[in-house]
Image: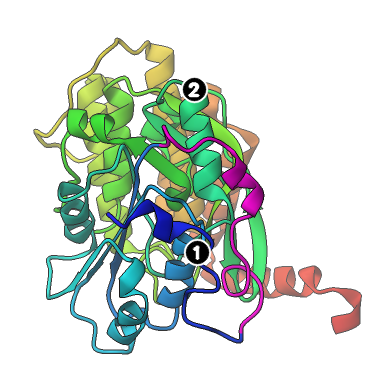
Amino acid sequence: MNKEKNNFLLLEKLPHTPKKGWPWNEESSQTVYQKKIKNLPVITIVTPTLNQGSFIEATIRSILLQNYPRLEFIILDGGSTDNTLEIIQKYQKWISYWESKKDNGQAAAIQKGFDRSKGHYLSWVNSDDLLCKNALWSLADFILENNNPDFIYGKAYFYEHGEFSRFEPIIENISSKALGSFPFVQPACFFSASCLKKVGPIDTSLNITFDYDLFSRMSLSGAQFQFIPAELAIFRRQPKAKTYKYNHDWDEDRIETFSRTMRSLKVGKSLLEPMNLIGTYKHGTIKYPLTRKYSQEEKRSIIADFIHDNLYFYYADMRNFKRTFRNAQFLRLYLPEHFSSFARKYYYRSILFKNFLFLNTLWRVFSSLFKKSPKNN
């Protein structure tokens, strides 16, 4: 880990850049250094990367310019062939550890970083995402004031096409919500090393939803999820990202992760069998230990959260109206108390579009025209 004194006021020490704004010519405010720093937790950030030379410098600077004195920053590159290594080498003086070699993918790289980490709290920031200014100081204050919580999640932004949109996290029933959906922005999530040790390493067999699986296991293990009302991260949505658009691989991973949760919760066959018929549940043996019992109402609500996400993904991203209909129909028949106005909308639209596909094209054209501002008409 870097010497603590080297992590103060780095803006003048890091390589110069003509770019403006955070994290180019700005750094975390000096006012945060007036607080006592003796008991600050060590925070480990792991950044996996592969050929992200267009973005990784901003990621690196957003982490270093936190000016957090007890930062452990690990970069694991999977053998990039673009300018990624050149950028990493520019900043290697302030990086705790980095390497570049062929690896077994993103999940394996992140777990490798965790295995060598010494941090009290851990997270990963992908090489196209950023931390917000003062994020680690806000996090450290929260940790010290709340007696070392298991899991912390905060506010975040999505960044796409040069525009920011705020993500407002759900606060109520978040541990249950984490089982049926993914109510977080991942780089705005931090967890204790002891919490990770309790549930075990990242499942590297999952290509996309290993974060969903990890956080689900933490929830099932009884981890306390606590919200910090601070802006922690910026999630960049860009076409080369694995999660830019919902696809078949993402769908398969989500269903596998969700199926493990269903088996862990011991959901009855009366719900599992119809979910299996519509492709929302897969039979298997992997399941996780529980620390408490879940009521039937909680189980039904968790399933409904997952199905509601499916409706949006299948309809909006995959244009699979048959699967949209089957999932909406499942809610209508088996979880009628969760057949919401949202579900009804997708239910009736999917009936129409799966039988008359050309109407969907007309609908999309009409919607795009309707959304245009007057000055563009």
Q: Which residue was labeled with disc 1?
A: 62
Residue closest to the far bottom: 82
Is 274 situated above or below 26? above
Per the rendered image, the range of residues in magenta is 19-40
Location of residue 263 with respect to 167 vertically, above or below: above
208 on left or right of 300 = left
Q: Residues within 10 Å of mark 2 (few under 14, many from 20)?
A: few
Where residue 280 sits, quadrant-wise, is top left
Quadrant of residue 269 within the rendered picture: top left
Q: Earlier in the sequence, mark 1 or mark 2?
A: 1
> Could you say where residue 11 lies in the image, as x and y percent from the top left?
55, 70
248 relative position to 21: left or right? left
Q: Which mark is residue 146?
A: 2
Q: How far from the left and from the top, in percent, is residue 292?
A: 29, 11
> What residue do we see at 19% from left, 28% from top?
198
Q: Position of residue 53 (x, y in %)?
A: 38, 83
Regarding residue 51, the answer to whether it shows in the image is: yes
How crowded is the residue under tag 1: few (<14 C-alpha within 10 Å), some, or many (20+)? many
